[in-house]
Amino acid sequence: MPTILLIEDNEMNRDMLSRRLERRGLTILIAVDGAEGLSKAKEHQPDLILMDLSLPVMDGWEATRQLKNTPETYQIPIIALTAHAMPADEQRARQAGCDDFDTKPVEFTRLLEKITVLLASRNVVFPT
């Protein structure tokens, strides 16, 4: 069963996303800030990370840069989740190392498609 690390400080967003993803057969790990996300990514080696960009302690841009510059975690795909919806925001997220980008409020079907594609790129089968 694929594991996703959800790094999100907003409790309502965490709850909604984690429940919906778990119903799809995914194992969900939670972190509430960028520093905790780094630690959990190194410890658990998830198949994919959903990264809020506006986080306390360490923002998602810096957490992504550090994950992509660390031998144990550079290969983990990261999808940026953010209310910052301008093209420059997507470009900044990709420059930090995000593999994909999605805006809030999350459109769940679109996000699932992105998750499926990135998991398949790592030969991880998404449950049906």
Image (tube, rainbow, N blue to C red):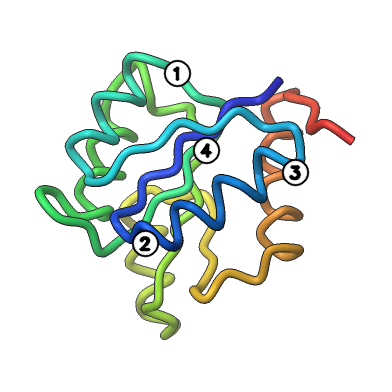
Classify mark 4: helix, strand or loop: loop
- Quadrant where the N terminus is found in the figure: top right
Classify mark 2: helix, strand or loop: helix
Q: Tell whether label 2 touches label 4 (CB within 8 Å).
A: no
**Residue 97 x/y as whole percent:** 38, 48
First-in-chain label (1 vs 3):
1
Q: Which mark is residue 45?
A: 1
First-in-chain label (3 vs 4):
4
Q: Is residue 74 above or below residue 79?
A: above
Q: Which residue is mark 2?
A: 93
Task: Work out whether residue 16 or residue 93 is closer to the camera in this orientation and state it.
Answer: 16
Task: Work out whether residue 32 or residue 76 is closer to the camera in this orientation and state it.
Answer: 32
**What amino acid does circle 2 point to?**
Ala
Q: Tell whether label 3 touches label 2 (CB within 8 Å).
A: no
Mark 2 packing: few (<14 Cα in 10 Å), some, or many (20+)?
A: many
Q: Which residue is mark 4?
A: 77
